Amino acid sequence: MAGFTEAPLQAGVRACHIRQAMPGPIDITVNGEARSLPAPLPLSDFLAGAGLDTRKVAVERNEEIVPRSAYATTLLQPGDQLEIVHFIGGG
Amino acid sequence: MDGVTTMGDDSWEVAGRSFRSRLVVGTGRYKSLEETAAAIEASGAEMVTVAVRRVNLSDPAAPMLQDFVPPDRYTYLPNTAGCHTAKDAVRTLRLAREAGGWNLVKLEVLGPPPFLYPDMPATFEAAEALIKDGFQVMVYCADDPLAAKRLEEMGCVAVMPLGAPIGSGLGLSNPFMLRSIIENAGVPVLVDAGIGTASEAAQAMELGCDAVLLNSAIAHAKDPVRMARAMKAGVEAGRHAHLAGRMPRNYAADASSPMAGLIR
């Protein structure tokens, strides 16, 4: 997937630790679809790579809301289930 | 003043927000986002319902509702349409709160097709969880005065009994129950769902409800923008008629013209 090849990790010690423990690609589920990421990466990077405007979406990770303020420090892990939603027309 | 009461000073309030328009409209079922925007503008609505759905990751740059119906101009009322359990409804509205940053929401927990009638036990369960979590809940409910009162006592900020099943366009199937709910309510009552045309919106307002909520009646009209105008006029007419106070029903004729001076 374009945009995820660099997988910048800025989350410090915890991120490095996880990278050592689980190097290489990870599999997650996003909106019900299987996705493979080259490495654990922050949610903010995933959203930017997907081309999403974070001001207009909300994210749930494993059935817990991820506050917008925590996108950069939320490191995606193998098996994570993400729901990314926005507002559409409805009655 | 010429003796005609204007609508200008006749606002209603929910959860501390004041609205002049008594028509709340949905944003679904339109042919395009352009048509959505035009119809909502014509309706004069200040509050609109919106749904929460997964983003399309294969087309992240697709135009979004907010670009056509700006949330800084309209009060967004996120709904739980499609939710058939309390858990799904609560999850959906927590996401909506994160996406939008506001906590005024429309709760609806629906039973199965073909009626999608409000599932009241699940609605009570979801309302309790949402209120505990700080939401201001406007709640779609059965046309049941006891259920509506209980939701009010739980802390819902508005109760919204159905006129008829969602999207049915059947009008008000039980005006007596709606009137009973309105007369007993201490929070705003909105007739939600079932309205098919402008006279039915007027009828709901004549019963004394605070506002009406509709979507399909406008979106599924042949000319949605024109029907939006009709609904605006219907709601205003019904509100005026309610405030004016209708004449009593007589089951006998009572001539308008004086008998005095009749030629012999």
Image (cartoon, helix red, strand yellow):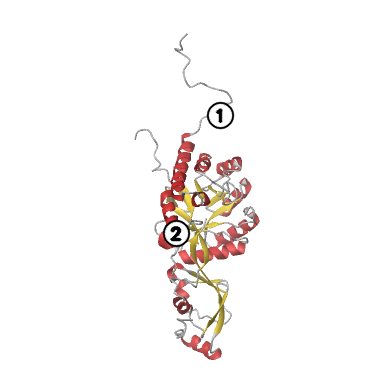
In this orientation, which residue lies closer to the viewer: A55 or B63?
Answer: B63
Q: Is residue B120 visible?
A: yes
Instruction: Pinpoint residue A19: horizontal percent, then vertical percent.
Output: 52, 88
The answer to whether the residue labelled 2 contacts the one labelled 1, judged by CB atoms less than 8 Å apart, is no
Q: Which residue is the extreme one toward the bottom?
A: A20
Q: Which residue is the extreme one toward the top?
A: B264
Residue A14 vertical placement versus B263 (above, below):
below
Give whichever of discs 2 and 1 has the lower sequence position.
2
Q: What residue is disc 2 on?
A: B33
Q: What residue type is labelled 1?
A: Arg
Chain identity of mark 2: B
Q: Can residue B70 be seen in this view?
A: no
Residue at horizontal 49 percent and vertical 89 percent from the top: A16
Residue B102 vertical placement versus B170 (above, below):
below
Q: What residue is disc 1 on?
A: B249
Disc 2: CA contacts within 10 A as few (<14), some (14-19) or many (>=20): many
* Quarter of the image that includes the N terminus of chain B: top left
Residue B42 vertical placement versus B88 (above, below):
above
In this orientation, which residue lies closer to the viewer: A58 or B255?
Answer: B255
Q: Of circles 2 and 1, which is in front?
A: 2
Assign a secondary structure to mark 1.
loop
Chain identity of mark 1: B
Horizontal relation, residue A49 to residue B250: left or right: left
Instruction: Pinpoint residue B111: horizontal percent, then vertical percent.
Output: 64, 56
